Amino acid sequence: MTSTQNKQIKIIISLLIVIGMGFFFKFYHGLGRQWFNNSGAAVFYEIFWCLFAYWFVKGRSAVNQIPLGVFIITCLLEILQLWHPPLLEQMRSTRIGRLLLGTTFSWWDFLYYAIGCIFGWLWLWQLDKSNAKKYQS
């Protein structure tokens, strides 16, 4: 198995874990439900986008650039929630639109986006580090 194939498999497994955890948090119905459904899920949302971008963008510099880019884009999407033109409202009326664009602006989301991007950066760093170690010899 080549280094690239190994990296792709690790990214796919990571994405499956993050997607599973994200949906679990988003649709959790137990104690602390509101925090898990909103804030906790936002952390996994950020990690997902970091991993997804890493699948396409190769190189060690991407490990640092991707989480920053994801943070900026998701912060812009959060600010976009203050705007309610018909097209965005139509998109937000679907489940996928709500999951991707969100519906309600909250200053607290910026904190969870930062936390998610930090965890995303750590995850990418670990993927890159383990891949580099394995094929260094």
Image (spheres, grey):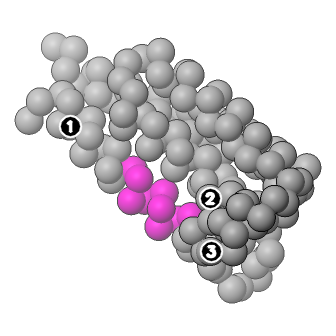
Distance (Cα) linking label 3 and label 1: 36 Å
- Relative to 10, 52 lies left or right: right
Q: What segment carries the magenta color?
A: 14-22
Q: Quadrant of residue 74?
A: top right
Q: Amino acid at mark 2?
A: Leu
> Mark 3 highlights which residue?
94
> Mark 1 highlights which residue?
6
Query: What SS does tag 1 mark?
Result: helix
Q: Is residue 18 magenta?
A: yes
| Vertical position of residue 61 compared to residue 41: above or below | above
Q: Amino acid at mark 1?
A: Asn
Q: Position of residue 67 (x, y in %)?
A: 59, 32
| Vertical position of residue 14 compared to residue 89: above or below | above
Give the number of the disc on residue 47: none
Q: Is residue 128 visible?
A: yes
Q: From the image, state whether disc 2 or disc 3 is nearer to you.
A: 3
Q: Position of residue 64 (x, y in %)?
A: 55, 21
Q: Position of residue 48 (x, y in %)?
A: 52, 49
Q: Position of residue 3 (x, y in %)?
A: 18, 28
- Relative to 26, 56 lies left or right: left
Distance (Cα) linking label 2 and label 3: 10 Å
Give the farthest residue toward the left: 1
| Image quarter in which the N terminus is found | top left
Mark before the other along the chain sequence, 1 or 2: 1
- Relative to 60, 46 lies left or right: right
Q: Amino acid at mark 3?
A: Thr
Tag 3 and tag 1, C-beta contact below 8 Å = no
Determine the main secondary structure of the stretch shown in magenta: helix
| Vertical position of residue 87 compared to residue 23: above or below | above
Query: What SS does tag 3 mark?
Result: loop
> Mark 2 highlights which residue?
100
Mark before the other along the chain sequence, 2 or 3: 3
